[in-house]
Amino acid sequence: MQYQSTRGHNLPQHFSDILLGGLAPDGGLYLPAEYPQLTADELESFRSLSYADLAFEVLSKFADDIPAEDLRDITRRTYTAEVYSNGRPGDDTSLITPLRSLGEEQGTSLHLLSLSNGPTLAFKDMAMQLLGNLFEYSLASSGEELNILGATSGDTGSAAEHAMRGKKNIRVVMLSPHGRMSSFQRAQMFSLQDENIVNLAVEGNFDDCQDIVKAVSKDAEFKAHHAIGTVNSINWGRVVAQVVYYVHGWLLATDGPGQRVSFSVPSGNFGNVCAGHIARCMGLPIDQLVVATNENDVLDEFFRTGVYRPRAAAETHHTSSPSMDISKASNFERFLYDLVDQDAVRLGELFRALDTDGGFDFSGTPEFDRIQEFGFVSGRSTHANRVETIRDVAQRYGVTIDPHTADGVSVARRNLREGVPMIVLETALPAKFADIVREALGTEPERPPAFEGIENLPQRFDVVPADVDRVKDVIVEHTGR
Ligand SMILES: *Cc1c(COP(=O)(O)O)cnc(C)c1O
């Protein structure tokens, strides 16, 4: 399997070559030269597999340069019931991503696919845990080390730290805005005592943290000398790891070949639903892919009108589903590439229009019609929708959901089709977002037992000013180079 850049200027690469990288050198994103296919017979043969072995079957189509026995060992070490043990009472944790049926609505069945039973109670663990083991494997064979530098406002940083903790030849230096995360988020990150995890609380906001990461990464010499890398959402390994749970969700919701299901996906950077698009292109019988946004509706606007208009940071709303608060969707280029029929020249023109005009308009073009062929629909959900949905799902089905999943349910309900099961991806557990649960239900969300009292654990972090050189000093100190 060979990979190419969406901008068309790169030599083909193998999976292992792009694993540790982010953007392609020409500024594009990596995609396989063609999507491998899943036949109906093959899908039926997957019904008896564990999640780990299903992951092996799917990933081996994309990572055929990793010896099969090594890859199988990696997926079996990654997707274990112990790692994904934080499910609701009654969940079968051995399934890794159990399917919870809510009930019948508008002539079809509504389900939640639990993707948030991992160490940080959010779906990002699904990909990040695999990445931790893939990185360790790849560095062991090359003998190199990797220093992952990142900025986080909560979710991604803690998923990365929990995935990389204790891994050989890997260090994580994570910047977060001092005093601006919830006490739960702080505890999740700062209570890690592993030597290879370095938490820096920056005196500034999230944008300051991100600017420092960008400045350090721009210093090519420093970056190379200290083997600095990232694990942001455009990483191909993360996207492809997410394809697996779409297949798993389909297997759990169907009992024979060709049956179609729809997925509703709470979306921000378009990483999660991009994996759904790839699964559909591989032949998984998906009817609709429902893109659910919050008030930051740049994606909803595109899918409804054909106008793509990324917002300025100042126009980005701080909402009660904060992990979807984005101004532009960093993985969107992967879908656009397919939408323009893999025409890198046309894609280059679109991105020039983005730079000069701040957006582009597909309305009335053949490409706009293809959005439907690819199964995409969308909708926007607001704080009031989230509160109402959390309340309604609790009353009707006795299940407490988090605000991101509530966005997914709210938009899913506007797109139900008779006879087509709708699977909403549960992207976080409600324990992480107590405020809105309290507002909706007047009670505290339940916490998985492992998380009782984590705020009282000893914490390890350093406070630093929002200063690039100070952060570089810390990196030098830790790498000893
Ligand atoms: C990251 C995140 C999302 C958005 O996922 P994308 O891949 O960025 O679209 C949704 N919900 C939660 C809880 C998240 O952490």
Image (cartoon, rainbow, N blue to C red):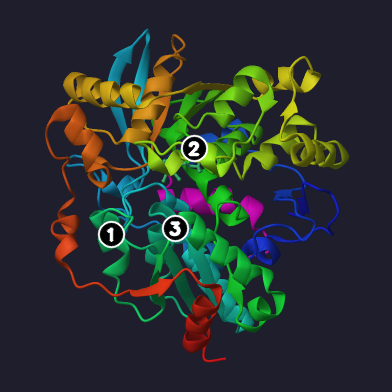
* Residue that mark 1 sits on: 82
* Residue that mark 3 sits on: 152
Q: Inspect the magenta stretch and tell me whether residue 194 lies in it.
A: no
Q: Which mark is residue 353?
A: none
Q: Secondary structure at mark 3?
A: loop
Q: Secondary structure at mark 1?
A: loop
| Magenta span: chief secondary structure | helix
**Looking at the picture, which amino acid does disc 1 mark?**
Glu
| Residue 63 place in picture, x, y as percent | 64, 58
Say left or right for 49 vs 342.
left
Which corner quadrant holds the C terminus?
A: bottom right
The residue lying at 77 percent from left, 51 percent from top is 5
Choose between 345 and 105: the one closer to the eye: 345
Does residue 169 appear anywhere in the picture? no
Q: Which mark is residue 246?
A: 2
Magenta stretch: give its range: 49-67
